[in-house]
Amino acid sequence: MSYDILSGYDDDEIGASEIIGALDILGKLGKGKARRGARLQERADKRPGENAGLERRVARLLGKTNQQESLAEVTPDTMRRYNMPLGRKSVPTTLTDLLEKTAQRTIRIERLVLSSTALPGFDVTTISIGVEVQNAAIANGPAEAFAFNAVGTTFRGNTLNVGMSASVGVLNSNPGTESISGIFFGEALQNS
């Protein structure tokens, strides 16, 4: 199970109704929801510890410290958008290469942008964050899908911690040696 800096554990999804319920419990939605909040608070009091994780995550999203957090935990204040350049490589025809970089800050990868004068002749073979492949299936996909003006190419990648590497495998199908560069974009929680 891997930890995700934005929403807790990767396999622990939170629905909108759970967030609204937690906001009710925390008394953030105003007078109209007070009765429902009181009922949810009463239910939470009957089962202590069951809603602690949800309350802690909602408090962090709101930028508030939670009374149940230990002093060792730090509540993030600001969500920041960062980029992580992968550099430029020359790839000989019919060969593959990796654009790879090691993270110097924790970041959750959300978008990949590739650039080349011969981008239509490149294929993306794999996108890896740490040791986990981010593709749903291993196959060659067009690199143009990750061009700067491509639409709908964001993805919810795994969290890349400091010292872990992220890489993009590319295959050059052009008739000659061509260069390609790339950059990852993502968000990270920043303490002030």
Image (tube, rainbow, N blue to C red):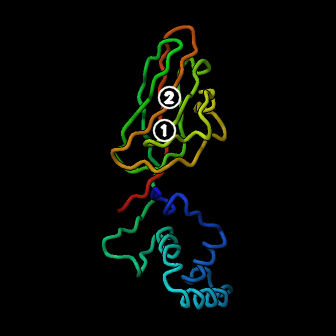
Horizontal side, residue 33 vs residue 7: left or right: right
Q: Quadrant of residue 5?
A: bottom left
Q: Residue at x 60, y 88 (%)?
A: 43
Vertical placement of 127 versus 106: above or below? above
Q: Position of residue 78 (x, y in %)?
A: 43, 61
Vertical placement of 171 versus 5: above or below? above
Vertical placement of 122 versus 62: above or below? above
Which residue has dot 1 on it? Answer: 128
Mark 2 vs 1, N-terminal side = 1
Report the amino acid beneath label 1: Ser
Q: Residues within 10 Å of mark 2 (few under 14, many from 20)?
A: some
Q: Residues within 10 Å of mark 1 (few under 14, many from 20)?
A: some
Q: Nearer the viewer, residue 28 or 135?
A: 135
Q: Nearer the viewer, residue 172 or 118?
A: 172
Horizontal side, residue 141 vs residue 85: left or right: right
Q: Position of residue 98 (x, y in %)?
A: 45, 27
Q: Position of residue 163 (x, y in %)?
A: 33, 44
Q: Quadrant of residue 22?
A: bottom right
Q: Residue at x 46, y 51 (%)?
A: 159
Vertical placement of 174 versus 181: above or below? above
Q: Residue furthest top?
A: 175
Q: Position of residue 100 (x, y in %)?
A: 41, 32
Report the amino acid beneath label 2: Gly
Q: Nearer the viewer, residue 47 or 144?
A: 47
**Is label 2 in contact with label 1 (beta carbons under 8 Å)?**
yes
Horizontal side, residue 49 vs residue 119: left or right: left
* Disc assigned to residue 169: 2
Q: Residue at x 41, y 80 (%)?
A: 68
Q: Secondary structure at mark 2?
A: strand
Q: Quadrant of residue 124?
A: top right
